[in-house]
Image (cartoon, rainbow, N blue to C red):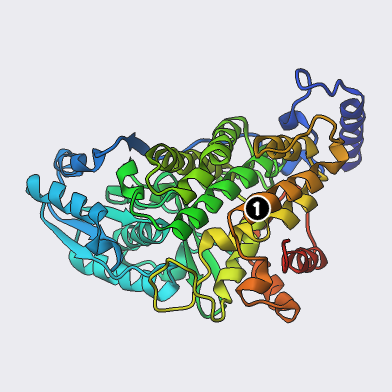
C-alpha cells in the first residue's frame, strides 16, 4: 500500500512538471507536498478574525459597546506611559459617559514576560470582570488576552495553554469574556488575531499562546491614536507589518502543512499561506510600500499614518490565519537575549529590542534563503517594494528581494544588523538554540532549515549594509 502511494506521488509530480506554468493555469495550492505524504497533510483552512471598526474618533463608541454587551464590571488594561496619553483619555471619557464601572491596570510591560503576564492574570482573577478593554500596542493587547483566558479558566496551570514544546499547547475550550482592543501602534495587528506573545525568562526565549478563542471580540482602529507615536516607534511597528505581510505570503501553503488535525479544534491558528490570506498580505504590502516612509518622516501626515493603521489590521488578518515563519522565529531569541540595547523613543527602564526591529533585521538573509521555493512570490514582493524586475531572472528572486529590503531599511536609518544592537558571532549558538523551540512558526518556512542553516542566517544578519 505504501509503495502504491509513493508511485501515485511520483506520477503527480511528473504531471506537475509537465503542466502549463503560466499564472492562469498553474496554482500554488495544487502542488504536491514535498515534505509529507498526501495522507497526513491538511486539506482545509479557515479564517478567524475579530470584528473590526475603523474611523477617526470611533473610540468614543466603546462605552456604548460595553453597554450593549451588558458589561457591569470592566477591566481597562494599558501601560504606564499610555495611561497619561490621549488614547486612554478617550477611552476613559467614553466609559464615564456611558456609566461603565471599571478598574484600570496600567502595569503592562512593554515586551511582556511570563511574570508580567502572571501579574496581569492575578489582577484579572481578583477583579471578577465581565469584560476587558485593552488600549495600547501588541504588548498590552496580548497581555489582556492572557488575563482574560486564565481568569476564565482559573484552575489551569500557566503552561497549559502555552505553545508546545515549551508548554502543553492545550486547546482552549472555556468561554471567555468580551475583549475590546484599541491598538495605538500600527504594527502588531494583535487586535485581529488569537495570538499572545511573551518572553519566557527562564529559557530566555519568546513563546506564546495561540488559539482562535482568545482573539478580541472587537478591534477599534482609530487613526487619531497613531498621531502621538514617535518616529522610531512608527518605524519599528511598520517593520512588523512589513514582515507579517512578506512571511504570510511566502509561507508554506496550507495543504502542504502536516499533520492534518483529527478534529478541527486542533487545526492551528497559523495554517500556512492560503488564497484569502494572500489577498490581505499583498494589500498590506502595497500600503507599506506607499505610506511607511511618509508615516515615519512626517508625524503630521494623517493620510500615511491612517493607512498604516489599516495596513496593520490587514496584515493581521493575513498572518493571523496563514502564520509567519523564519523572521519571526529568529526574532524571539534576538529579543529574549538582549544585552544592553535601549532603542530611541522608547521610554522603558530595561534593555529592549523592539519586536519589529528584531524581526526585520534578519529579513534580507531569510528571504534570500527561502526564495528557492516559490521564487515568483518573492519576486512579486520585491516589485511591490520598488524593484525593477523587467529583466530579472526568476532564479535571482531571493537576492533581488534581499537587496530591495536592504535599500528600504538603509533609507529609514535602521541599525546595521545584529552587531549594531549588541550581538556578535559568539552569540550565534545561543540565538540558534533560542530559535529551535519556535517550531510553531519555523515549520511554516517554505524551505526546511537545519541548525547550520540558522547559524548561517544569523551570521549573514550581523551586518546589513
Q: Farthest residue toward the top?
A: 24
Quadrant that contains the C terminus? bottom right
Q: Is residue 369 left or right of residue 210?
A: right
- How many numbered discs? 1
Q: Position of residue 401 (x, y in %)?
A: 74, 45
Quarter of the image holding residue 335?
Answer: bottom right
Residue 1 appears anywhere in the view: no
Disc 1 target residue: 325
Q: Position of residue 158 (x, y in %)?
A: 42, 69
Report crowding for label 1: few under 14, some 14 to 19, many 20 or more residues within 10 A (C-alpha): many
The residue lying at 72 percent from left, 69 percent from top is: 462
Residue 360 appears anywhere in the view: yes
Between 246 and 307, the one lying in front of the other is 307
Q: Position of residue 266 (x, y in %)?
A: 54, 48
Q: Is residue 34 left or right of residue 383?
A: right
Q: Is residue 238 above or below residue 24?
A: below
Q: Position of residue 73 (x, y in %)?
A: 14, 55
Q: Is residue 390 above or below residue 36?
A: above
Quadrant that contains the N terminus? top right
Q: Is residue 446 left or right of residue 220?
A: right
The residue lying at 51 percent from left, 65 percent from top is: 354
The residue lying at 73 percent from left, 36 percent from top is: 377
Quarter of the image holding residue 329?
Answer: bottom right
Q: Look at the numbered disc 1 and give the secondary structure of its residue.
A: loop
Between 249 and 345, the one lying in front of the other is 345
Between 74 and 157, the one lying in front of the other is 74
Amino acid at each position: 500500500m505504501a509503495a502504491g502511494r509513493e508511485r501515485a506521488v511520483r506520477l503527480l509530480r511528473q504531471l506537475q512538471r509537465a503542466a502549463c506554468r503560466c499564472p492562469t493555469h498553474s496554482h500554488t495550492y495544487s502542488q504536491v507536498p514535498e515534505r509529507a505524504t498526501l495522507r497526513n497533510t491538511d486539506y482545509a483552512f479557515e479564517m478567524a478574525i475579530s470584528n473590526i471598526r475603523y474611523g477617526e474618533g470611533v473610540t468614543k463608541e466603546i462605552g456604548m459597546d460595553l453597554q450593549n454587551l451588558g458589561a457591569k464590571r470592566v477591566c481597562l488594561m494599558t501601560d504606564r506611559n499610555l495611561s497619561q496619553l490621549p488614547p486612554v483619555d478617550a477611552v476613559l471619557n467614553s466609559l464615564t459617559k456611558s456609566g461603565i464601572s471599571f478598574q484600570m491596570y496600567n502595569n503592562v510591560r512593554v515586551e511582556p514576560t511570563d511574570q508580567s503576564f502572571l501579574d496581569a492574570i492575578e489582577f484579572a482573577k481578583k477583579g471578577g470582570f465581565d469584560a476587558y478593554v485593552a488600549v495600547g500596542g501588541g504588548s498590552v493587547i496580548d497581555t489582556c488576552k492572557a488575563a482574560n483566558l486564565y481568569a476564565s479558566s482559573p484552575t489551569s496551570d500557566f503552561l497549559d495553554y502555552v505553545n508546545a514544546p515549551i508548554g502543553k499547547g492545550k486547546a482552549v475550550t472555556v468561554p471567555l469574556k468580551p475583549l475590546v482592543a484599541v491598538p495605538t501602534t500600527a504594527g502588531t495587528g494583535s487586535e485581529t488575531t488569537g495570538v499572545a506573545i511573551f518572553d519566557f525568562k527562564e529559557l530566555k526565549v519568546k513563546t506564546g499562546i495561540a488559539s482562535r478563542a482568545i482573539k478580541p471580540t472587537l478591534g477599534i482602529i482609530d487613526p487619531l491614536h497613531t498621531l502621538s507615536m514617535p518616529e522610531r516607534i512608527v518605524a519599528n511597528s511598520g517593520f512588523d507589518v512589513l514582515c507579517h505581510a512578506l512571511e504570510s505570503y511566502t509561507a508554506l501553503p496550507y495543504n502542504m502543512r502536516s499533520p492534518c488535525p483529527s478534529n478541527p479544534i486542533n487545526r492551528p491558528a497559523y495554517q500556512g499561506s492560503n488564497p484569502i490570506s494572500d489577498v490581505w498580505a499583498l494589500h498590506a504590502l502595497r500600503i507599506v510600500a506607499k505610506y511607511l516612509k511618509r508615516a515615519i518622516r512626517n508625524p503630521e501626515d494623517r493620510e500615511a499614518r491612517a493607512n498604516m493603521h489599516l495596513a496593520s489590521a490587514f496584515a493581521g488578518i493575513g498572518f493571523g490565519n496563514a502564520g509567519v515563519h523564519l523572521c519571526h522565529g529568529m526574532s524571539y531569541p534576538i529579543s529574549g537575549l538582549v544585552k544592553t540595547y535601549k532603542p530611541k523613543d522608547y521610554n522603558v527602564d530595561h534593555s529592549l529590542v523592539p519586536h519589529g526591529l528584531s524581526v526585520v533585521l534578519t529579513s534580507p538573509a531569510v528571504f534570500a534563503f527561502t526564495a528557492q521555493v516559490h521564487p515568483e512570490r518573492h519576486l512579486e514582493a520585491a516589485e511591490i517594494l520598488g524593484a525593477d524586475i523587467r529583466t530579472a531572472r526568476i532564479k535571482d528572486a531571493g537576492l533581488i528581494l534581499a537587496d530591495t529590503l536592504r535599500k528600504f531599511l538603509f533609507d529609514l536609518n535602521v541599525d546595521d544588523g545584529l552587531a549594531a544592537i549588541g550581538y556578535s558571532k559568539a552569540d550565534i549558538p545561543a540565538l540558534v538554540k533560542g530559535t529551535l523551540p519556535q517550531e510553531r512558526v519555523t515549520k511554516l518556512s517554505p524551505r526546511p532549515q537545519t541548525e547550520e542553516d540558522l547559524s548561517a542566517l544569523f551570521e549573514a544578519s550581523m551586518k546589513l549594509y
